[in-house]
Amino acid sequence: MTEKPVINFGLEGIYVDESAISKVDGQNGKLWYRGYTIEDLSEHSNFEEVSYLLVYGKLPNKKEYEEFVKKMKERRELPKEVMDVIKAMAKDSHPMDVMRTAGSMLAMYDKDLNNKEKDATIDKVITLISKLASIAAVTGRFRKGMSYIPPDKSLGHSANFLYMLTGKKPTPTEEKLIDLMFILHAEHSTNASTFSVLVTASTLADIYAATTTGIGTLKGPLHGGADEAALKMMYAIGDPANTEKYIEEALEGKQRIMGFGHRVYKVYDPRAKIVRKYLEERMGQNPSEEVRKLLEIALKAEKLMIDKLGKTKGIWPNIDFFSGPLYRSLGIEGEMFTPIFVASRMSGWGAHVVEYWNNNKLFRPLEWYTGPLDVPYIPIDKR
């Protein structure tokens, strides 16, 4: 009998490709996009420039940047049929279901759908980056029964998203915060959704099909839905004074504390550190009572979890834990967190498809069969 191979469940520790897009150093808590540290990019860059960096492999010069931004602004509007579907779904469906359906519809409007040349693919990626943000914003409006806000070409990508969602032009601080979240979520190596995008792309399906796969994968609470789940936990805690009791009881009951632990990071998630810094700054800006409580709960829970599990078991806060309070400080409801993740991560998904199609190979992993063999067939009337 053939000896059973080593099974790496969840493909943990298995390299499936090589890439020059991003590097995650889980042991030392480091993240680079195309060699640039996430700290430098979040401090000095913006989402448009970061998207260009991921997709093209280099930072743009002024002319390249302006042309890229112009294309993104020109593609923000959504086709009427897409808007109609969003309106029909928004009130009774989770926003991620709307994202998945409306995003897949974009393929209808691509007259060169199956062109996989590099320049053509990049052009489609730019369209998707621009329109997925609009889909997310329109979904957020329609689910509350509010009217459509057309895009504003005077605003940058992230600021325009927030404007289309809330109907208010963001302050410079609010613009920085939403742009920060877009940058931090733009790329993270071969995570579950990026891998699923690449599996679909490896079949040479079109990029809209691959993106739809990614959206479906990102919906799961162990991946993109974790920030929404972490916020729900904070609401369940209710008051900062209840934090310790809630955490103690949850750990005793072996419940998962959403927003803590990571498959790659065994130390503090560098993205979470960045968000935490901005959260502390928000505490000094007289936030609403709701946001103040969320911030206090988050910071108290963080300390408790680090003391209990961080130093001993390597379970540290990840970006999902701190995302909720920051989004709520911008007036964004929990159900919209993962659609924002989609709109941000499209840059990374697109970059990976462009890179993978340069040397495409169909994914076909193996599985070890554990069932019986040569089972005698019994006719239905004798079973």
Image (cartoon, rainbow, N blue to C red):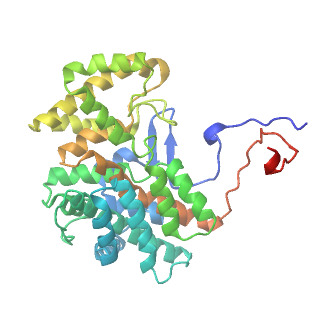
- Relative image position of residue 296 (x, y in whole percent): 20, 28
- Relative image position of residue 271 (x, y in whole percent): 37, 41
Quarter of the image where one finds residue 272: top left
Q: Name the residue: 14% across, 61% down.
A: 167
Q: In this view, does 345 lie above or below 87?
A: above
Q: In this view, does 363 lie above or below 88?
A: above
Residue 17 lies left or right of residue 166; in this view the side is right
Residue 44 lies left or right of residue 55; in this view the side is left
Residue 281 at least partly seen: yes
Quarter of the image where one finds residue 339: bottom left
- Relative image position of residue 252 (x, y in whole percent): 41, 15
Q: Residue furthest left?
A: 286
Q: Name the residue: 42% across, 79% down.
A: 109
Q: Residue furthest front?
A: 381
Q: In which quarter of the image is the C terminus?
A: top right
Q: Name the residue: 64% across, 65% down.
A: 203
Residue 277 lies left or right of residue 267; in this view the side is left
